[in-house]
Amino acid sequence: MRNARRGRLNARLEPELGKKLASLRRRTGLGTSDVVRTSIERYYETVRVGGTDARAVLEVTGFLASGEGPADLSERYKEHLVEGLVIAAEQLGSGRVFSTDQRDFGAYRWKDRKPFQNLLRL
């Protein structure tokens, strides 16, 4: 099998882009060619899946994911968390948890009467 010839690229960079390239090389330990190849691959994938739409860019680069949950999760996250903890405690038969919520955690109960035991003592 023959190796495909690699193309050669010469580019003029503004000073600011030159600084960014140098920073990427330092931070990643990659050479200039590797940084350019990786950048082209990422840009290509971004354009291929939807252009420059912000959501598409974030999804392609791995900075955005989504999940399923209650529609009011952002407004009632504490209530949903407590409901989940109560269900888990009752299924497991244990109220031992590990939480940084020292202030409110003592008010939560499972089986309507048993307090949770927070294993984290700050």
Image (cartoon, rainbow, N blue to C red):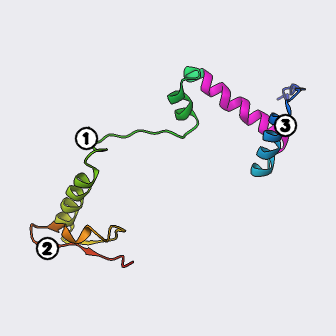
The residue mark sitting in front, 1 or 2, is 1
Asked whether 93 or 21 is in front, the reply is 21
At label 2, which amino acid type do we have?
A: Lys
Mark 3 closeness class: few <14, some 14–19, many ≥20 residues within 10 Å: few
User: On screen, 98 above or below 23?
Assistant: below
Which residue was labeled with disc 2? 114
The image quarter containing residue 82 is: bottom left
Numbered label attached to residue 18 = 3
In the image: residue 43, left or right of residue 80: right
Q: Position of residue 19 (x, y in %)?
A: 82, 41
Tell me which amino acid carries mark 3. Gly
Look at 22% across and 54% down and name the residue there: 79
Q: Identify the magenta region.
A: 31-47
Q: CA distance from mark 1 to mark 2?
A: 28 Å
Q: Residue at x 87, y 25 (%)?
A: 7
Could you tell me which quadrant the N terminus lies in? top right
